[in-house]
Amino acid sequence: MVKVTSELIDWIIDHGHAVAGQHTDIADPFWAKKTTELLLSGELQPDEYERLAARLSGVKSMATSTQDKAEKVFGGNGGVRVKAASEKFSEKRFVGRHVKTGGEIVNPFTGAATEQPSQRDFAKSGVLFKHLANRAGLGVSLQTYERELLDEMATADPWAGTVGGEYGAGFTGVKALLDDATSGGIEITPTWFDDAVVTFPLLSGELFPFVDVRDVPRGRRVEGGSIGNPTVSWGQGDNTEVSLFDTASLVAEINTTIFGAAVAIEIGRDFLSDAAVDVGSQLTKLVGERLAADLDKQIANGNGTSSPQGIFVASGLTTTTPDNGAGGVPTLNDYMTLMFSIGKQYRNPANRCAFLSNDVTYRRSRAIKIDTASPSTDQRPALAPLTEISSYSSLGWRHAVQNDLTNQVCAFGALSKYRLYRRQGMEIRFEQGGATLARKNLVLLVARARFGGRVMDANAFAKWTTGQA
């Protein structure tokens, strides 16, 4: 709404746009109408109007409001701004919580709380899957907005993967690679896709969210080393030599091989024609959830030859003997001994310590009674109150479960001292050959990731391997 002041009226009269004395009332609609005409014609500039209407500061004039609206529509630079295809989808993310503990999990790549993928991430994932299905000759077509979304991804988003035999990460402008007739871009993926897939193991895994995860920039092998602690000599006085520290074996090699891990999922051809958001969310979750189970399995018991080295396979760990001998029923002291077999410097919350066994061994630990006599007079569990049996904690520490382990084994250790290396740039491809897939109208989605891992400090873990069968 145009505001009229006495200064504004004087300006209109002085510039010959009205006759003095013809309209004497400041509230006369004539002045507001005349001001509007002058603003629209350009004879009265907005900044001049603002000065003349300064007495009513804080209230936007019609001219300013019109100008603001125009800038919003035309982008303030004389051109119309067209919404990007990705703006059709929400980019809001919600903090995810562990499915068992209910607590927030820190993302090892960002150091912040793990966030669920946004609707926009799922939409982009769906477009990527549909594009690759189309490149594989599955007859899946992309709608106009999906093509725009793919172009936006190929132009602006960072990607990672193998290009021309060389691994790279964080590069943009991959449209030519996606359209390549040979590879079809199957060996490169957006970096947010890897993170979205890994989100699900973080939210549901027993071990993966708590180990030390590092990104690997290149190669199939990580070469590292460890440095031991030097000794300190006390009681030194004048003319007394300091004992020399023997540096033999001070620095040791810690090398890790990176292994490929493929996830295969059968999906219907018709399913691929669904909305991009649905396809992206379903397939991303399936790949992530399958990785969740297998990453935990490898961290616990990987053989180190064809998969990452697991905790129970690592050499140098302290091994304890159960009180009741090989195959004997576990005791409270077995768990106490296991926990105190690693140094106090490791037993702090920052190192994310936990017991590790299968569910049967955990259940048996809750059968250890306060009164061990038979028959016992006090059958309360020794390791936790009855109300905390389902809490999966032992002696105040989290008790992780991995059901591929045998009943005879149990471990305790600082999970932060296990390092898992991740190579970004998952390979995605579709397979449709074979009579079985053809008869069922199915295709095979194969997603190949690469991981390597090993215990970095054997002193941070202890185990028994001869428990009750």
Image (cartoon, grey):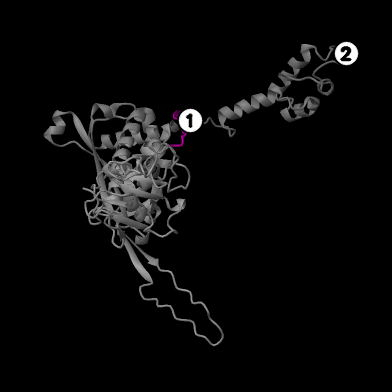
Horizontal side of 103 relative to 370 (left or right) equals: right
Q: Quadrant of residue 282?
A: top left
Kind of residue indicated by mark 2: Gly
Q: Which residues are magenta?
A: 87-96
Question: Residue 339 magenta-drawn?
Answer: no
Q: Amino acid at mark 1?
A: Lys
Local crowd size for mark 2, using a 10 Å CA cut-off: few (<14), some (14–19), many (≥20): few
| Residue extending furthest toward the right | 21
Q: Are marks 1 and 2 in contact (CB under 8 Å)?
A: no
Dividing the picture into quadrants, the one containing residue 20 is top right
Please name the residue that numbered disc 2 is placed on: 21
Q: Element at badge 1?
A: loop
- The percent position of residue 154, horizontal first and vertical second, equals 39, 41
Mark 2 element type: loop
N-term-proximal mark, 1 vs 2: 2
Say which residue appears at 40% left-offset and 78% top-offset: 246
Q: Which marked residue is nearer to the observer: mark 1 or mark 2?
A: 1
**Mark 1 neighbour class, 10 Å CA radius: few under 14, some 14 to 19, many 20 or more:** few
Report whether 204 appears left or right of 31.
left
Q: In this rendering, is residue 240 above or below 439?
A: below
Image disc number at residue 83: 1
Principal secondary structure, stretch drawn in magenta: loop
Q: Position of residue 292 (x, y in %)?
A: 32, 42
Residue extending farthest to the left is: 435
How many numbered callouts?
A: 2
Whether the magenta-drawn stretch holds residue 93 is answered as yes
Q: Is residue 220 above or below residue 151?
A: below
Q: Nearer the viewer, residue 1 or 63?
A: 1
Residue 182: tell me if it is visible. no
Q: Nearer the viewer, residue 14 or 35?
A: 35
Q: CA distance from mark 1 to mark 2?
A: 53 Å
